[in-house]
Amino acid sequence: MDFSQIGSLKELLRAGGPVLIFLIFLSVYSVSIMIDRYIKYKKSINKSRKLMEYVRYHLPSRNFAKIMDACRKGGYANTPAAKLVMNLLTSDKTSLAELNDLSDSIIDWEIAQLSRKLSVLATLASTTPFIGLFGTVLGVMRAFSDLSTASGAGPSAVAKGISEALVNTAAGLFVAVPALIAYNYFLSKLNFFTKNMEYLAQEVISAKLYIPQNEPVSETEQQ
């Protein structure tokens, strides 16, 4: 069997050996993380954006009761934006510095929750090509070992072993490339959402303290 004849799953597994089986497991794990984060982001970020629009619409009139009612609704209650707005509006803190610290801590916590498992995708993207290469090296070593023990074996025997071993390299790249694309996609969405949360926090704080937008804050208001 040469590389062009590897068709069935059984042949692929036999060609790649234990390393290929391990890479298949990592591929399934990587896909499960992508699906989990996609569902989580769609639920949290998209609903937060809708709530942000509603909050920004009512902030100029300082209609905090209506804003908090929206944050308590079932579809938005557990979103990062709802938690940020509710904590800021119900806090008994009255200074700008204290409210800024509160908003920073809430945003950091919510972004940390959304960032969970992204490091796993980054790790898979960077390590699986080397795992595949490791499997290929083992296959090449096995091919030369078979060549040394086989009588009358020619270069075709080595080529056969090497072609089978390269399955692991291909599998490593097959796992790494989607993981890297997914990691960069989720990271870009998370960075943009973080900025939106920070802007929303400043708008809510300004409305609560009745600080007109774009007006410099005096030293007495900061204390």
Image (cartoon, grey):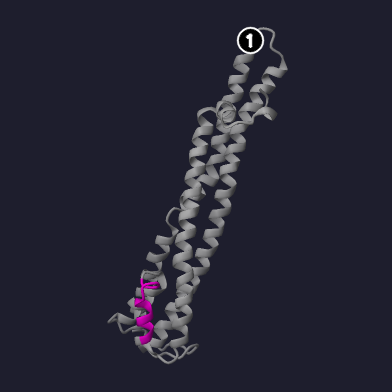
Give the residue drawn at x 62%, y 20%.
143
Examine the image and state in which quarter residue 40 appears. Answer: bottom left
Q: Is residue 45 or residue 201 the one in the foreground?
A: 45
Q: Where is residue 29 in the image (x, y as percent from the top left)?
A: 47, 45
Q: Is residue 133 or residue 164 the one in the foreground?
A: 164
Residue 134 in sight: yes
Give the residue drawn at x 60%, y 31%.
8
Q: Quadrant of the C terminus?
A: bottom left
Q: Which residue lies furthest to the left in this view?
A: 92
Q: Is residue 191 or residue 62 the one in the foreground?
A: 62
Which range of residues does the magenta coloring cover? 66-77
Left or right: residue 111 versus residue 148 is left
Q: Which residue lies furthest to the top in this view?
A: 151
Q: Residue furthest front?
A: 8
SS assignment at label 1: loop
Q: Which amino acid does label 1 sit on?
A: Ala
Examine the image and state in which quarter residue 73 appears. Answer: bottom left
Give the residue drawn at x 44%, y 77%.
51
Q: Quadrant of the N terminus?
A: top right
Q: How many labels does the image show?
A: 1
Q: Residue furthest right?
A: 155
145 relative to 33, above or below: above
Q: Where is residue 121 in the image (x, y as percent from the top left)?
A: 50, 50
Give the residue drawn at x 61%, y 24%.
140
Question: Which residue was labeled with disc 1?
Answer: 150
Q: Position of residue 98 (x, y in %)?
A: 33, 78
Left or right: residue 150 versus residue 78 is right
